[in-house]
Image: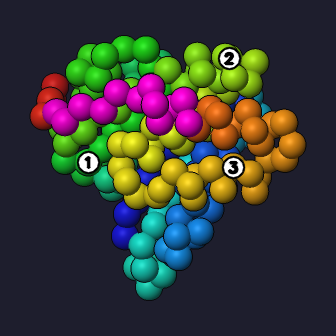
């Protein structure tokens, strides 16, 4: 079972990103499940979403406590939220940030095999006119992991959005893929 944990803030599309990854995986014939964890507030507070991709008999309905894939939509979270708890050594981290991969990974404080960074907020502003990084980070996730393909990711976006909004979000996915910087690394600060 491939397990993914997504951290961000309300309003950044954390829950939607989890749903898009799961939907894209389902288009490829994979069993998947996505579910969020958040409080009553809608915008601003930390939000976590979980995705499982694999065999149905291996799935659970519990929070992902040992993720192999960690996605961080808000680059300020690692400074005061333990986003790295339970991260499997040698996994993959994808972060929405303008920092270099090594600097970002040092702040997260895990030993990963790959670190991927992308300015998802900048792409959101450029393409959507709003600082929403989720679809750009979806493109970075495709590039960094290979767990889902680009066509499936774009199909998921066009299923969840319509008209001009769908076209803009597909473009954000494409730019996220193109601009993502993926580095194989071995950094541990703890």
Residue 188 or residue 93, whichever sits in front: 93
Instruction: Classify 10 Å Cα crowding around label 2: few (below 14), some (14-19), many (20 and above).
Output: some
Magenta stretch: give its range: 174-185
Element carrying mark 1? strand
Examine the rendered structure and indicate whether residue 104 appears above or below residue 55: above
Question: How far across and down, in percent of the image, does residue 114 sit?
Answer: 25, 39
Marks 1 and 2 sit apart, C-alpha to C-alpha, by: 29 Å
Q: Residue at x 52, y 70 (%)?
A: 28
Residue 137 or residue 190, whichever sits in front: 137
Indicate which disc residue 166 carries.
none
Q: Is residue 161 left or right of residue 126?
A: right
Q: Earlier in the sequence, mark 1 or mark 3?
A: 1
Picture colour scheme: rainbow
Q: Earlier in the sequence, mark 3 or mark 2?
A: 2
Element carrying mark 2? helix
Q: Locate residue 19: give its quadrant.
A: bottom right
Q: Which residue is mark 2?
A: 125
Question: How far across and down, in percent of the image, does residue 65 sit?
Answer: 38, 55
- Residue at the limit of the structure toward the right, as seen here: 163
Q: Quadrant of the C terminus?
A: top left
Q: Residue at x 45, y 20 (%)?
A: 97
Instruction: Classify 10 Å Cα crowding around label 3: few (below 14), some (14-19), many (20 and above).
Output: many
Indicate which disc residue 157 carries.
3
Question: How far across and down, in percent of the image, does residue 127 sit?
Answer: 69, 23
Residue 187 or residue 149, whichever sits in front: 149
Q: Which residue is mark 1?
A: 91
Q: Residue at x 68, y 17 (%)?
A: 125
């Amino acid at each position: 079972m491939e397990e993914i944990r997504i951290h961000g803030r309300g309003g950044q599309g954390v829950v939607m990103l989890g749903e898009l990854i799961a939907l894209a995986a389902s288009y490829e014939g994979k069993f998947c499940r996505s579910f969020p964890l958040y409080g009553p507030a809608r915008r601003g507070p930390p939000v976590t979403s979980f995705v499982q991709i694999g065999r149905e008999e291996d799935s659970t309905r519990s929070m992902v406590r040992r993720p192999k894939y960690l996605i961080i939509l808000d680059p300020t979270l690692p400074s005061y939220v333990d986003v790295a708890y339970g991260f499997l050594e040698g996994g993959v981290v994808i972060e929405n940030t303008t920092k270099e991969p090594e600097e970002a990974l040092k702040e997260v404080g895990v030993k990963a095999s790959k670190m991927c960074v992308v300015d998802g907020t900048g792409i959101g502003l450029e393409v959507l006119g709003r600082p929403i990084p989720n679809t750009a980070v979806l493109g970075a996730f495709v590039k960094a992991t290979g767990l889902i393909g680009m066509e499936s990711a774009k199909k998921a976006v066009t299923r969840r959005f319509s008209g001009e909004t769908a076209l803009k979000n597909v473009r954000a996915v494409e730019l996220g893929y193109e601009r993502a910087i993926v580095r194989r690394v071995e950094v541990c600060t703890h």
